[in-house]
Amino acid sequence: MKYAKMLAAILGVALLAVQFVRPAKNRSQPAPGSGIESAFPVPGHVMEVFKRSCFDCHSDSTVYPWYSEIQPLGWLLNSHIEDGKRRLDFDRFASYRPVRQYGKFKDIVDQLQQDEMPLGSYLFIHRYARLTTDEKEEVIHWSGAMIDSIRTHFPVDSLQRKKPDARPGK
């Protein structure tokens, strides 16, 4: 029993101490003209969907919930944001090479069709971010039109992601 109280006290002190180790907030400023709307005509309703359901993890416009101030939840949230922005950053979309833009539009279509985005863990708390069938179809349709637009400006073979040659010596 004595050891259990000591262990509980140590864990309590450790939990209190980690509250002072906080990740940096997602507050960087993208270069002007680098957002997705600078490179592609984004209809207002599609942009509203992106802002409501995507921007917290895929832009510099994260709205932090109250629980982000509690560690280790803040660290976990920060990890999700960093991973989301590494995969797709709407605030830097115009700076992507055409092959990456093309691939990201295809990813948006695929992930919406397979109900992979927004993440279920995000929707559990942020119910307002849930997309209706019509909203998904609208974003999928618009993304498909952007894929077609890119195809008209670049040869299709230049838009294929290059896979590294796995053979040794190549």
Image: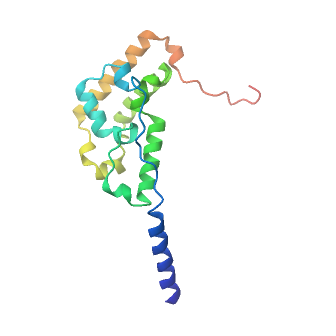
- Which is more toward the observer, 90 or 150? 90
Q: Position of residue 68 (x, y in %)?
A: 37, 55
Q: Nearer the viewer, residue 21 or 50?
A: 21
Q: How is the image coloured?
A: rainbow
Query: Image point 47% across, 79% down: which residue?
Result: 9
Outermost residue, bottom side: 1
Q: Quadrant of residue 28 in the image?
A: top left
As drawn, the residue found furthest toward the right would be 169
Q: Answer with the quarter of the image where residue 119 lies.
A: top left
- Look at the picture and state if 73 lies above or below 40: below
At horizontal 41% and vertical 25% (from top left) the residue drawn is 34
- Residue at 43%, 60% (x, y): give it: 71
Return the residue nearer the eye: 7 or 99. 7
Place of residue 41 in the rendered image (x, y in percent of width and height, measured from the top left): 31, 19
Q: What is the quadrant of the C terminus in the image?
A: top right
Across and down, in percent, residue 147 comes to 39, 19
Residue 128, how many percent across, how many down? 24, 45
Q: In the picture provided, is 136 more to the left or to the right than 34?
A: left
- Is residue 21 rendered to the left or right of residue 136? right
State left or right for residue 15 relative to residue 51. right
Asked whether the viewer can see residue 134, the reply is yes
Q: Is residue 6 above or below residue 148?
A: below
**Residue sitting nearer the eye, 160 or 25:** 25
Is 29 located above or below residue 152 in the figure?
A: below
Q: Is residue 137 visible?
A: no
Residue at the image point whose x is 26% and y is 27% from the top: 138
